[in-house]
Amino acid sequence: MKHHPASVADIQMEVPMAFVEGKRKDGSSWIPEFIVSLASDVCIGCGRCFKACTQGVLNLVEEEDDDDNTRMFMAVAKEGQCIGCKACAAACPKGCFEHAALSC
């Protein structure tokens, strides 16, 4: 006699976490990693990441303190336009960016 589960809740399956996956020209797999955070307190405002980003994700912010000192740093302006190429992180001399794969 076969046993059938009483409900779907009785069935347990392990489902591996899936990631957005791309293909390179040579057919190999590539998992894009999107911007999770940008350490604006570490950023020196050099603009290298801004120039490297082809999608307009970043924006230069100018901030004045109480002593009228101006500080410039990058900020994520359009997070949803990030394509996960990590060109910004490669260009950043201070390591300000944190990226992660997008799980589905």
Image (cartoon, rainbow, N blue to C red):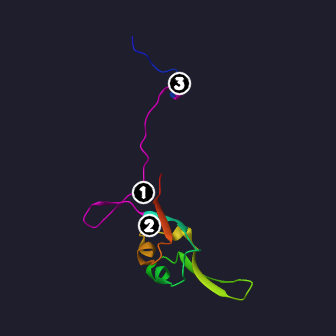
Extreme residue toward the top, this view: 1
Q: Which residue is mark 3?
A: 7
The reply to whether the magenta stretch includes residue 31 is yes
Classify residue 76 by image quadrant. Answer: bottom right
For disc 1, the neighbor class at 10 Å (few under 14, some 14 to 19, many from 20) is few
Q: Please name the amino acid that badge 3 sits on.
A: Ser
Mark 3 against mark 2, which lies toward the viewer?
2
The stretch of residues the image draws in magenta is: 9-32
Upstream in sequence: badge 1 or badge 3: 3
Q: Secondary structure at mark 3?
A: loop
Residue 16, relative to residue 51: is it above or below? above
Could you give the CA–CA distance between mark 3 and mark 2, rounded to whole angstroms?
40 Å
**Mark sitting on residue 20:** 1
Name which of mark 3 and mark 2 comes first in the sequence: 3
Percent position of residue 3, x then y: 43, 16
Chief SS of the magenta region? loop
Q: In front here: 39 or 4?
A: 39
Amino acid type of the residue that numbered disc 2 sits on in the rendered structure: Gly
Could you tell me if the residues under marks 1 and 2 are in contact, i.e. CB atoms within 8 Å? Answer: yes
Pick the quarter of the image with the N terminus: top left
Vertical placement of residue 24 versus 71, above or below? above
Along the horizontal axis of the image, is 78 left or right of 1?
A: right
Q: Are marks 3 and 2 in contact (CB under 8 Å)?
A: no
Query: Please, is residue 86 above or below residue 10 in the view?
Result: below
Q: Position of residue 75 (x, y in %)?
A: 58, 75
Q: From the viewer's perspective, is 66 left or right of 101?
A: right
Q: CA distance from mark 1 to mark 3?
A: 31 Å
Q: Nearer the viewer, mark 1 or mark 3?
A: 1
Q: Which residue is mark 2?
A: 84
- Amino acid type at mark 1: Val
At horizontal 30% and vertical 65% (from top left) the residue drawn is 24
